[in-house]
Image (spheres, helix red, strand yellow):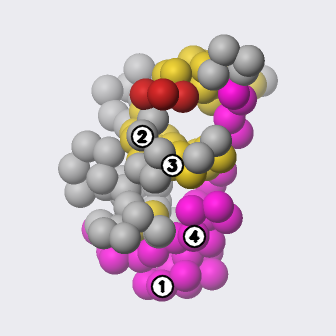
Amino acid sequence: MSRVVFLCRLDELPDGQSRGFDPLGTGNDTLLVVRQGRDLHAWRNDCPHQAGTVMAWRKDAYLNRDGNRIVCHAHGAQFDIATGVCTLGPCLGQALTRVPLLLDSADHVHAVIDG
C-alpha cells in the first residue's frame, strides 16, 4: 500500500540543486530530490553499490561540482540525474531506486511512499 507524503513547496527546492528528505520521520534523509526547472527527480538515498550507504557527504550535498550528476560520496559513483543510472564508478550500469513524486496545482511537492 502506498501513501502520499508532503515534502515541501517547489520554491523551497532551489533550481539546479538537491535536497534530502525524511518523509517517514526516521531521523535520516531517506530520499533525495533534484530540481531542474519544473522537472523533479527523486531517488532513495541508498547507493546500489553497497546497500545502506547514504549518498551525501553532508546535508543536501548529492551533486557533483558541476551539478550535472548525483554522486555517492562514499564510493565516487556518479549517476545520471534523470534516469538514476550509474555512469561512472563501481556500480556502472546499476541504478538508483526512483521515488515517484506528485506536484499539485499549488506547487506542493509530495512523495509516493511504498509500505
The mark lying in front, picked from 2 and 1, is 2
Give residue 12's quadrant in the image.
top left
The mark lying in front, picked from 2 and 4, is 2
Looking at the picture, which amino acid does disc 3 mark? Answer: Val
The mark lying in front, picked from 1 and 3, is 3
In terms of sequence position, does the residue under pointer 4 or pointer 1 come before the other? 4
Is any atom of residue 57 visible in this view? yes
Can you say whether 65 is above or below 16 in the image?
below
Q: Which residue is mark 2?
A: 14
Q: Which residue is mark 3?
A: 34
Looking at the picture, which amino acid does disc 4 mark? Answer: Asp
Q: Spatial distance from mark 2 to mark 1, Cα to Cα?
A: 26 Å
In terms of sequence position, does the residue under pointer 3 or pointer 4 come before the other? 3
Instruction: Give the residues in magenta.
Output: 74-103
Q: Which residue is mark 4?
A: 80
Q: Which residue is mark 1?
A: 88
Q: Spatial distance from mark 1 to mark 3, Cα to Cα?
A: 19 Å
Asked if the residue at tag 1 contacts the one at tag 4, i.e. Cβ–Cβ closer than 8 Å, the answer is no
User: How far from the left and from the top, in percent, is residue 51?
Assistant: 46, 60
In terms of sequence position, does the residue under pointer 2 or pointer 1 come before the other? 2
Looking at the picture, which amino acid does disc 1 mark? Answer: Leu
Asked if the residue at tag 3 contacts the one at tag 1, i.e. Cβ–Cβ closer than 8 Å, the answer is no
Q: Is residue 39 left or right of residue 62?
A: right
Can you say whether 58 is above or below 73 in the image?
above
Within 10 Å of disc 3 (Cα), the crowding (few <14, some 14-19, many 20+) is many
Residue 10 falls inside the magenta stretch:
no
